[in-house]
């Protein structure tokens, strides 16, 4: 089935009314997507460490059990850290959701096909890894339900949102890792960020 | 004389430093320490499918204000290298406790290449490497590594010598 959803619309909808949601984005297009929706100190957009987005989400969710954590990443990035779905499944963090924006392509390197383009099913993998909620999403009408799920449903939650493979204008967050870390910690932890 | 219970001494250091998350890939050398961390209600031991996941775990924990530690064998160091680059770029503290293989008396030739390269590859990625060559050195070295990493926002690894761990044959390892 041909995808009809557009990634920037999906991410903007998921991050609308985000309240105090903590957001990790995998490197490449999803980092630009969350920035296009509005940069925030409570965003941690990655510029490297491919394969680690979901695990950063897990570490953050375990450290901050009272806050909701959302990982938004690409299919290529998720495939590189597929084992992390099993690790998250064992820990069962109630406050963690992972959303893969799945265009079936490696967008930063020339739009080469990823495994999902050949039918590898990430939502089925997450379900097999004990995520309580895991769906493949293809229709605009399902996005609002997913947005509520990220805020309200006990995790771990997973969704693969099928989107059109398209090259979009870059919307870049700050690049410096130390800055991204420091602004996130200060916004989350306040003055305690500097004394821990 | 009773052999020194260095895993219990490490656990005491981790508890005293306020470490809350312990990422690990199962390893014979760390078996007792892993069990102590699992039994400690103030800690959460997180079993990983590969050591690389432990870097993301530590980074996420620190973004959330918690201290963590990563337990692995020297072979696992080869699995974390690119991800460690993130810790340096972001100045996120990382403490890795590495039980060494491929050193003195190693019986498995497939462990030797990584074991011999462990220090060099960690140092190449900007990790500060301490080594502990005797049981009584281990706890003070872990203490120093925790202080250095969390006071200076750097990655520090403690290499626990194979001389201390003393695995000399495959049979001996499976019986442990």
Image: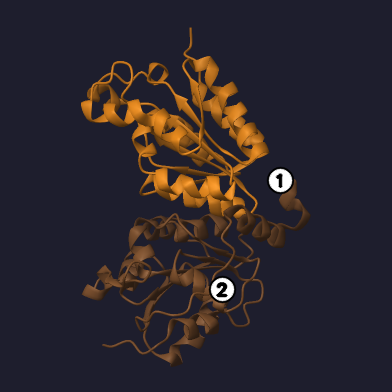
> Disc 1 vs disc 2: which is toward the camera?
2
* Residue at the limit of the structure toward the bottom, as seen here: A141
Residue at mark 1 to residue at mark 2: CA–CA distance = 28 Å
Which mark, residue A196?
1
In percent of width and height, residue A91 lies at 46, 56
Tag 1, which chain?
A
Tell me the brown chain.
Answer: A
Which SS class for mark 2? helix
Location of mark 2 (residue): A35
**Quadrant of the rendered structure where residue A41 is?**
bottom right
| Horizontal side of residue B124 vs A124, given as left or right | right
Which SS class for mark 1? loop
- Which mark is first along the chain, 2 or 1? 2
Nearest the viewer among B107 and A9 is A9
Q: In which quarter of the image is the N terminus of chain A?
A: bottom left
In percent of width and height, residue B15 lies at 62, 35
A29 lies above or below A49: below
Tag 2, which chain?
A
In percent of width and height, residue B59 lies at 54, 51
Are the two marked residues, 1 and 2, in contact with CB atoms closer than 8 angstroms? Answer: no
Find chain B in the image and tell me its colour.
orange
B176 lies above or below A163: above
**Quadrant of the rendered structure where residue B136 is?**
top right
* Residue at the limit of the structure toward the right, as seen here: A191
A156 lies above or below B1: below
In percent of width and height, residue A107 lies at 36, 71
| Horizontal side of residue A142 vs B75, given as left or right | right
- Mark count: 2
Which mark, residue B16?
none
Q: In which quarter of the image is the C terminus of chain A?
A: top right
């Amino acid at each position: 089935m041909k995808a009809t959803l557009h990634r920037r619309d999906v991410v903007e909808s998921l991050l609308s009314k985000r309240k105090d949601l903590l957001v990790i984005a995998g490197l490449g297009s999803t980092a630009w997507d969350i920035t296009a929706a509005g940069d925030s100190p409570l965003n941690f957009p990655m510029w490297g460490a491919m394969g680690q987005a979901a695990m950063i989400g897990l570490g953050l969710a375990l450290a901050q059990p009272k806050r909701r954590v959302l990982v938004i990443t690409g299919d290529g990035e998720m495939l590189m850290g597929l084992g992390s779905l099993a690790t998250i499944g064992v820990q069962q963090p109630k406050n963690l959701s992972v959303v893969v924006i799945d265009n079936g392509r490696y967008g930063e390197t020339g739009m080469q096909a990823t495994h999902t383009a050949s039918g590898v099913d990430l939502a089925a993998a997450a379900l097999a890894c004990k995520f309580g909620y895991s769906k493949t999403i293809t229709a605009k009408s399902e996005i609002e339900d997913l947005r509520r799920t990220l805020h309200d449903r006990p995790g771990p939650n997973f969704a693969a949102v099928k989107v059109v493979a398209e090259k979009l204008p870059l919307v870049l967050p700050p690049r410096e890792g130390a800055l991204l870390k420091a602004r996130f910690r200060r916004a989350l932890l306040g003055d305690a960020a500097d004394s821990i | 004389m009773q052999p020194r219970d260095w895993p219990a001494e490490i656990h005491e250091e981790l508890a005293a430093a306020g470490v809350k998350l312990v990422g690990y890939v199962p390893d014979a050398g760390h078996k007792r320490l892993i069990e102590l961390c699992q039994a400690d209600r103030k800690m959460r031991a997180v079993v990983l499918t590969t050591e690389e996941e432990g870097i993301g775990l530590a980074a996420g924990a620190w973004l959330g204000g918690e201290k963590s530690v990563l337990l692995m064998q020297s072979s696992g160091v080869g699995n974390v290298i690119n991800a460690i680059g993130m810790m340096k770029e972001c100045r996120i503290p990382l403490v890795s406790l590495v039980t060494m293989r491929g050193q003195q008396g190693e019986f498995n030739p497939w462990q030797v290449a990584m074991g011999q390269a462990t220090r060099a590859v960690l140092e190449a990625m900007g990790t500060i490497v301490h080594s502990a060559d005797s049981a009584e050195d281990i706890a003070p070295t872990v203490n120093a590594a925790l202080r250095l990493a969390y006071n200076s926002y750097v990655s520090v690894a403690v290499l626990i010598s194979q001389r201390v761990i003393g695995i000399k044959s495959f049979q001996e390892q499976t019986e442990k």
